[in-house]
């Protein structure tokens, strides 16, 4: 047997041997879990019983539940904005619906597993939605409705953003920061006069609040104002202040809705 034939036989044995080795099972790609945080304004200046506000905020909650709650481990939290925002967590839910690994299942069994998962997820959506709407409709008749501490929401976002989840934040508020005392902002007493001043204030405040890294959180602000609202009600310089401040602290996007 010549050397060329021997080499060919050796290659065949190697190929045959490799084919007998157990194949590594490929793990399905893991989608990063979502962590949604809703801040609902419970101060005097926001009336969730008003038809326009109720419809807008209810729809916002319906949409965000659908967008964020998609797999086991997705989380939704609700905090009330008022005088004591940092200690006002009103709801914390974690999705329990889980799709089993269908990689080695037949097409029929894969479809059945998907159907079971879809039904479980639908039940989770209903649970999250009903409990969130119940929190939206709660009235705050206590003295905490006199002040609006939105700054206190920043450590909450920063803590969530330090985790490995995608953090999506929703403010259902007029965003009128109103806290008395040295070094605080009270936009009822004094709001920014123009965008330049709003930007200056935001950058100054960002330096004081820089320990709150928002780490690419995505933020949406749902203002309770109709399109016909005056600039005295819906002051665009206030919105500009928040857009600047949140981006200075590391938010990936800040959208007004």
Image (cartoon, rainbow, N blue to C red):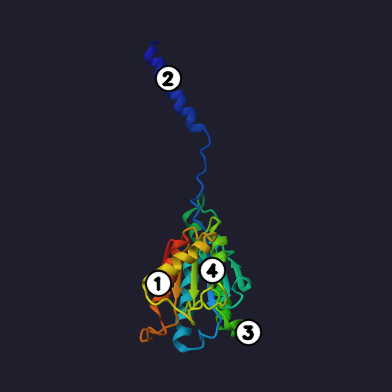
Which residue lies at the image location 40% right of the left edge and 80% below the top edge?
Answer: 235
- First-in-chain label (4 vs 3): 4
Callout 1: SS: helix
Q: Nearer the viewer, residue 29 or 50?
A: 50
Residues under labels 1 and 3: Cα distance? Answer: 31 Å
Looking at the image, is mark 2 or mark 4 nearer the viewer?
A: 4
Mark sitting on residue 197: 1
Is disc 4 surrounded by few (<14), some (14 to 19) or many (20+) residues within 10 Å?
A: many
Picture quadrant where residue 180 is located? bottom right
Q: Position of residue 121 (x, y in %)?
A: 53, 67
C-alpha gap between disc 2 and disc 4: 64 Å
Label located before the other in sequence (2 or 4): 2
Where is residue 184 drawn, in percent x and y?
54, 73
Which of pointers 1 and 2 indicates the residue nearer the eye?
1
**Residue at the disc numbered 4:** 37
Label 3, secondary structure: give it.
helix
> Which quadrant does the N terminus fall into?
top left
N-term-proximal mark, 1 vs 2 = 2
Residue occupying the point 37% across, 70% down: 196
Q: Earlier in the sequence, mark 4 or mark 1?
A: 4
Is the residue 95 above or below the residue 223 in the image? above
Asked if marks 1 and 2 touch (Cβ < 8 Å), the reply is no
Task: Report if the CB atoms under discs 2 and 3 are less than 8 Å apart.
Answer: no
Residue position for label 2: 9
Q: Is residue 149 visible?
A: yes
Question: Residue 199 versus residue 243: which sits nearer the camera?
Answer: 199
In three-dimensional space, the C-alpha distance between marks 4 and 1, rounded to whole angstroms, equals 29 Å
Q: Earlier in the sequence, mark 2 or mark 3?
A: 2
Q: Earlier in the sequence, mark 1 or mark 3?
A: 3
Mark 1 Cα-neighbour bin, 10 Å: few <14, some 14–19, many ≥20? some
Residue with the mark numbered 3: 143
């Amino acid at each position: 047997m010549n050397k060329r034939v021997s080499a060919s036989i050796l290659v065949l044995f190697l190929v045959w041997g490799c084919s007998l080795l157990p194949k590594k099972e490929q793990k399905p790609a893991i989608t990063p879990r979502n962590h949604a945080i809703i801040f609902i304004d419970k101060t005097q200046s926001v009336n969730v019983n008003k038809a326009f506000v109720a419809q807008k905020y209810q729809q916002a909650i319906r949409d965000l539940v659908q967008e964020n709650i998609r797999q086991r481990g997705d989380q939704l939290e609700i905090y009330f904005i008022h005088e004591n925002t940092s200690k006002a967590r009103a709801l914390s839910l974690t999705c329990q619906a889980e799709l089993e690994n269908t990689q080695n299942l037949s097409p029929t069994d894969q479809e059945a597993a998907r159907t079971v998962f879809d039904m479980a997820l639908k039940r989770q959506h209903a649970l999250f939605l009903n409990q969130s709407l119940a929190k939206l409709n709660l009235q705050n008749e206590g003295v905490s409705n006199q002040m609006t501490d939105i700054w206190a929401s920043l450590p909450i976002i920063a803590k969530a953003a330090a985790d490995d989840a995608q953090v999506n934040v929703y403010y259902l508020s007029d965003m009128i920061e109103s806290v008395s005392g040295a070094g605080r902002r009270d936009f009822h007493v004094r709001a920014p006069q123009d965008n330049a001043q709003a930007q200056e204030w935001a950058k100054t405040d960002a330096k004081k609040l820089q320990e709150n890294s928002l780490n690419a959180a995505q933020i949406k602000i749902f203002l309770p104002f109709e399109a016909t609202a005056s600039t005295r009600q819906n002051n665009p310089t206030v919105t500009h202040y928040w857009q600047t401040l949140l981006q200075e602290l590391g938010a990936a996007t800040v959208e007004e809705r």
